[in-house]
């Protein structure tokens, strides 16, 4: 897989077509048009393509310049990989190149939105990239025509990727075997829990509901330095087959995350247990 910048109108059309293929929007107005992509890349945006065998574009990442509280940053609007190329590290590779380009621009923060109930992006964002989250936006994009959203509110985390922190460096080193420029080492295990994590309280243990997991009653007032929030690993399938249950998960976890963010917690890690059909977010309270 080769990652490179996209800079022509023809390449922008390829990226727009890939967005449509991945998200399956019924409404073409939801796709970022090539005319916007080409202007963005000429004015500080970052548009990357991942090309596999035969030169086919199998993934892309699109980001634009932004400001956060007066601080120069990058907003990563979209990251997508076609189904047949997933599980090969394409998304991680796109984010690493995006980080490198942002650093060359003198920028040390990239932000993006992500669905709190999608385990694959959560594993990428927290376990591999080292993001943190302290913001929750209700129905950020409104009603979406994408088959991946199925009418459920588009609630989103706002991920903060602080590019130059030791935490991010460690996660990238563990995920990709990057030790230092020009050197590589074997990848290290990801998501190993220390004693402090093991002692964290799970505030919403899921319960069995036939072939699905249903949200447990959330406890919103646990005191402690760390808590865990559980989500199902098959939310995309749930959206299609059990939309009412998917909505229940959305509203239940919305209340939990908003309550703990208000109390000074932020999400700092994610643990995925595919064999048990669930994942868990680790929330830590910031030191006073």
Image (spheres, rainbow, N blue to C red):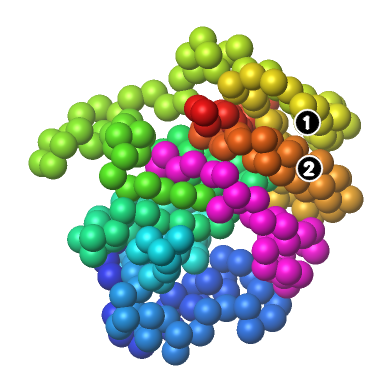
Q: Tell me the number on the disc at residue 194.
A: none
Instruction: Give the secondary structure at mark 1.
Output: loop
Residue appearing at x 57%, y 74% in the figure: 20
Q: Nearer the viewer, residue 139 or 143?
A: 139
In magenta, the rendered stretch is: 129-158
Q: Distance between the residues labelled 1 and 2?
A: 8 Å
* As drawn, 194 above or below 50: above
Q: Can residue 188 be seen in this view?
A: yes
Residue 175 visible in the picture: no
Query: Mark 2 and mark 1 in contact (Cβ < 8 Å)?
Result: yes
Q: In this picture, is 150 found above or below 14?
A: above
Picture residue at 82% right of the left edge, 47% below the top = 251
Please name the residue shown 48% across and 14% down the image. Answer: 194
Q: Name the residue under label 1.
A: 220
Q: Name the residue under label 2.
A: 255
Name the element at disc 2: helix
Kindly identify the residue that appears in the image at 80 percent across and 63 percent down. Answer: 151
Instruction: Report whether 204 appears left or right of 148.
Output: right
* Residue count near mark 1 (Cα–Cα under 10 Å), binned few <14, some 14–19, many ≥20: some
Position of residue 54 measured from the top left corner of the image (x, y, whole percent): 31, 67
Image position, residue 181 (x, y; %): 13, 42
């Amino acid at each position: 897989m080769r990652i490179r910048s996209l800079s022509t109108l023809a390449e922008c059309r390829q990226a727009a077509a890939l967005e449509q293929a991945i998200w399956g929007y019924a409404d073409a107005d939801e796709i970022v048009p090539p005319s916007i992509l080409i202007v963005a890349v000429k004015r500080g945006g970052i548009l990357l393509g991942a090309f596999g065998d035969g030169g086919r574009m199998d993934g892309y990442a699109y980001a634009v310049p932004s400001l956060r509280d007066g601080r120069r940053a990058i907003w990563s609007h979209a990251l997508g990989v076609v189904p047949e190329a997933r599980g090969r590290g394409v998304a991680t590779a796109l984010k690493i190149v995006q980080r490198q380009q942002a650093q060359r621009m003198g920028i040390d923060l990239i932000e993006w939105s992500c669905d709190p109930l999608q385990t694959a992006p959560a594993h990428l964002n927290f376990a591999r990239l080292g993001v943190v989250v302290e913001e929750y936006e209700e129905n950020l994009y409104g009603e979406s025509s994408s088959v991946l959203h199925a009418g459920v509110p588009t609630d989103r985390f706002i991920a903060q990727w602080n590019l130059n922190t030791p935490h991010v460096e460690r996660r990238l080193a563990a995920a990709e075997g990057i030790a230092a420029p020009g050197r590589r080492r074997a990848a290290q295990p990801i998501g190993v829990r220390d004693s402090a994590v093991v002692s964290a309280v799970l505030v919403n243990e899921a319960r069995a509901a036939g072939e699905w997991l249903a949200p447990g009653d959330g406890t919103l007032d646990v005191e402690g330095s760390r808590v865990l929030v559980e989500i199902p690993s098959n939310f995309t399938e749930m959206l299609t087959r059990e939309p009412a249950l998917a909505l229940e998960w959305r509203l239940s976890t919305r209340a939990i995350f908003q309550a703990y963010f208000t109390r000074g917690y932020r999400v700092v890690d994610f643990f995925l247990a595919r064999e048990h059909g669930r994942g868990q977010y680790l929330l830590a309270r910031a030191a006073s």
